[in-house]
Image (tube, rainbow, N blue to C red):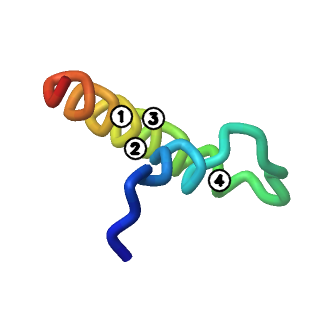
């Protein structure tokens, strides 16, 4: 599991994906804030 190059977190959460139902919009906001936290965390590690 230890690889020299870790997978980017964005690959786990693709931005462009189909939205078959309206419920996905409910999760969009928490997911965006989660992405932002991950991004800020990665930036602080630099």
Residue beneath disc 1: 33
Question: Looking at the image, which is closer to me, 6 or 23?
Answer: 6
Question: Looking at the image, which is closer to me, 46 or 42?
Answer: 46
On screen, residue 43 versus residue 8, left or right, reads left
Residue at the location (78% across, 48% down)? Answer: 17
Give how far apart the Cα atoms at labels 1 and 3 are: 4 Å
Residue beneath disc 4: 24
Of labels 4 and 2, earlier in sequence is 4
Quarter occupied by residue 32? top left
Residue 42 percent coordinates (x, y): 26, 32
SS under mark 4 = helix
Give how far apart the Cα atoms at labels 4 and 2 are: 11 Å
Mark sitting on residue 30: 2
**Disc 1 to disc 4: CB gap under 8 Å:** no
Which quadrant would the C terminus be assigned to in this image? top left
Residue at the location (34% across, 42% down)? Answer: 34
Give how far apart the Cα atoms at labels 1 and 2 are: 5 Å
Looking at the image, residue 7 lies above or below residue 37: below
**Disc 1 to disc 3: CB gap under 8 Å:** yes
Residue beneath disc 3: 32
Mark 1 residue crowding within 10 angstroms, few (<14) / some (14–19) / many (20+): few
Give how far apart the Cα atoms at labels 1 and 4 are: 15 Å
**Disc 1 to disc 2: CB gap under 8 Å:** yes
Question: Looking at the image, which is closer to me, 3 or 17?
Answer: 3
């Amino acid at each position: 599991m230890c690889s020299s190059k870790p997978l980017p977190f964005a690959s786990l959460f693709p931005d462009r994906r189909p939205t078959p139902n309206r419920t996905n919009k409910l999760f969009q906001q928490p997911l965006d804030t989660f992405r932002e936290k991950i991004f800020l965390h990665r930036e602080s590690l630099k």
